[in-house]
Image (cartoon, rainbow, N blue to C red):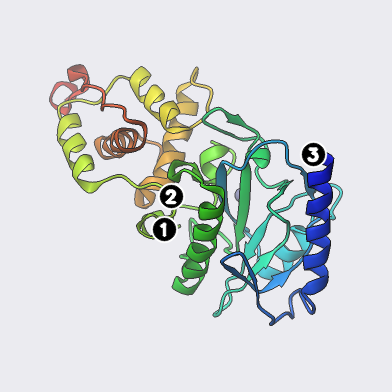
Amino acid sequence: MRSVAVLVCLSVLFLVGCASTGTGTQSTTRETFNQTPIDGYIPCAAIQRRTQPITCLVLHHTATALPSAMQTLQGKTSSHRVGIHYLVSDEPKPRVFRMAHECFATSHAGKSQWKDYNGLNQYSVGIEIVNLDGNVHAYPPAQIAAIIRLCQDIIRRNNINPVNVVAHSDIAVGRKVDPGSLFPWAQLAAAGVGAWPDASEVSRCTQLYQRGLPTTAQIKLMLKTYGYGFDDNSDANLKLAIEAFQRHFRGRKADGVIDVETIAILAALNSKYNGVNPPTPNLATSPAVKK
Ligand SMILES: [Zn+2]
């Protein structure tokens, strides 16, 4: 059955590729793939047979301008074979390019982990967003609008859990920093794309942890419960995981330093999405005791 499915995918890929006349950088034609307006089809060679169901959506920034990103993401460079399902440009009227059918896995995540998923290529759909560095350059509103439309469609069709809409930096802790601290995750969540904590729960947890933070062991468990994969034998790795978390949920200060606000956000997320009660404060770490 699997080989039949792959054959069907190949056929679809071929047919759509043929149907999208004039695709590529000069394309102005629009096709609609499910509910997603697609502006062009550029085939990516770095695809593999998908062996796992789609459970995650991974967002990236390209770190290069559009022409270079388009070239690289076609996956033809033997020393750096990367790929992606979708590429969103940074033009005044952003274009969405489809590069691989979702029924294939593509090489965009590298060594990665989220929850029990190891190697996210097989579990995910990937979107590359043109931005030289999302930790430095803001994402234009028109580009964000295009990303939201695309994500909404992918999430709806694949029934992706909000917690599993992740940054590359979430799933490759200490190795990747994209799409960066300026990526507007709160805005996406307000449009039904990805997770975000409830303000009232963050406020409640802030009050709780002003009395004292949870223990380091509890904080590691909180991060892992939410999804972060890291070797918890070292404090340096914990700092990197905290930094990745902050980059997603508190981008204005992603320094890897554990503080009340960060832990309150993490607790509120686990409470909302995992049904886990916030751990009790460790009074030995309270600011009053520390000083
Ligand atoms: Zn990336």
Tell me the crowding category of disc 1: few under 14, some 14 to 19, or many 20 or more residues within 10 angstroms, Cα based. Answer: many
Front position in the image: 111 or 116: 116
Q: Mark 3 points at which residue?
A: 2
Mark 2 falls on what kind of element?
loop
Tell me where residue 105 appears, x and y as whole percent: 72, 45
* Residue shown at the point (65%, 43%) measured from the top left: 109
Quadrant location of the N terminus in the rendered image: top right
Q: Name the residue under label 1.
A: 188
Front position in the image: 15 or 60: 15
How far is mark 1 from mark 3, CA to CA? 35 Å
Q: Which comes before the other along the chain, label 1 or label 2? A: 1
Q: Mark 2 points at which residue?
A: 194
27 up-or-down from 238: above or below: below
- Of tags 1 and 3, the one toward the viewer is 3
Tell me where residue 102 appears, x and y as whole percent: 68, 52
Q: What residue type is labelled 1?
A: Leu
* Residue shown at the point (39%, 50%) measured from the top left: 251
184 with respect to 65 (left or right): left
* Residue shown at the point (39%, 60%) measured from the top left: 191
Quadrant location of the C terminus in the rendered image: top left
Mark 3 falls on what kind of element?
helix
Q: Which comes before the other along the chain, label 3 or label 2? A: 3
Q: Are marks 1 and 2 in contact (CB under 8 Å)?
A: yes
How far is mark 3 from mark 2, CA to CA? 31 Å
Tell me where residue 149 appears, x and y as whole percent: 50, 65
- Of tags 3 and 2, the one toward the viewer is 3
How far is mark 1 from mark 2, CA to CA? 7 Å
* Residue 65, quarter of the rendered image: bottom right
